[in-house]
Amino acid sequence: MAFHQLFAHVFRADSKTTLRAVAFCFGLLGVANSSSATILIATDASWKVTASSPATGDWNSSATFDASAWQSATVLYNVPGYVAKGIWSSGGQYSTIETQMWARGIFNLAVLPLDAFVNNGFDDDGDVFVNGVQVVSDHNGFANNSFADITPYLVVGNNVIAFNVSDNYRVWGYNHSAWAQVDARFAAVPEPMSLALVGLGLGAMTLTRRRAKA
Ligand SMILES: [Ca+2]
Ligand SMILES: [Ca+2]
């Protein structure tokens, strides 16, 4: 039955139960079939940071790198338009001692996304890495934002996003911060529970039709 025939039939059936069942079915199908942008990871207090140069070179590539000596990030402010928070190490925004920071976060992917992008901002300069691949190189000497397509560098399983950042334009004394956010878009997969509910809804509609004919 074509959709317009089904729609016409439903309104002829004059059954609140049927209308509710059909509305429910198509509501669920709409949710199940839509693609959605999902924020995978964004800088916040859960990120690990250090103001000391990492001991080994795999700090930006290995999910199993030993970051136990690193500290949790200090959240400095909200970033307008993003979920990400501006972070730095414990020295904070006006430290006169900590002029560099290294930071890392880990996120797990069950499937690869259709596409994924990183937005970030450095006060003032730095590099962003995804699984060890440099995706941002910002060395213009002042605070600014960057954007990069990281789709090719993601893997199923654990992924590492990491950056190092330095402050080198000390307007208002020392002021430094950094933020990063990964947004990914996935192909939607209908959930088994939604399909089961759609089946129940269609069953209820059929039952209503039979009762209307009897
Ligand atoms: Ca910069
Ligand atoms: Ca600065």
Image (cartoon, helix red, strand yellow):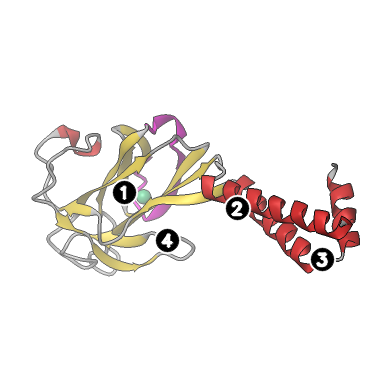
Q: Is residue 17 left or right of residue 167?
A: right
What element does badge 1 sit on?
strand
What element does badge 3 sit on?
loop
What element does badge 4 sit on?
loop
Q: Which label number is shown at residue 197?
A: 2
Q: Position of residue 77 (x, y in %)?
A: 34, 69
Q: CA distance from mark 1 to mark 3?
A: 65 Å
Chain-order first, disc 3 or disc 4: 3
Viewer-proximal residue, 39 or 108? 108
Q: Which residue is mark 1?
A: 125
Residue type highlighted by circle 2 = Leu
Whether the residue carrying mark 4 lies under 8 Å from ligand 1 is answered with: no
Q: Position of residue 132 (x, y in %)?
A: 28, 32
Residue type highlighted by circle 4 = Val
Point 58% across, 48% down: residue? 196
Q: Position of residue 25 (x, y in %)?
A: 68, 54
Q: CA distance from mark 2 to mark 1?
A: 52 Å
Chain-order first, disc 1 or disc 3: 3
Chain-order first, disc 3 or disc 2: 3
Q: Quadrant of residue 74?
A: bottom left
Chain-order first, disc 4 or disc 1: 4
Kindly check if marks 2 and 4 are in contact, taking CB atoms under 8 A apart as contact: no
Kindly check if marks 3 and 2 are in contact, taking CB atoms under 8 A apart as contact: no
Q: Which residues are magenta?
A: 137-155
Chain-order first, disc 2 or disc 1: 1
Kindly check if marks 4 and 1 are in contact, taking CB atoms under 8 A apart as contact: no
Q: CA distance from mark 2 to mark 4?
A: 33 Å
Task: Pick the quarter of the image with the C terminus.
Answer: bottom right
Q: Position of residue 106 (x, y in %)?
A: 28, 45
Q: Which label number is shown at residue 15?
A: 3
Q: CA distance from mark 3 to mark 4?
A: 45 Å
Whether the residue carrying mark 1 lies under 8 Å from ligand 1 is answered with: yes
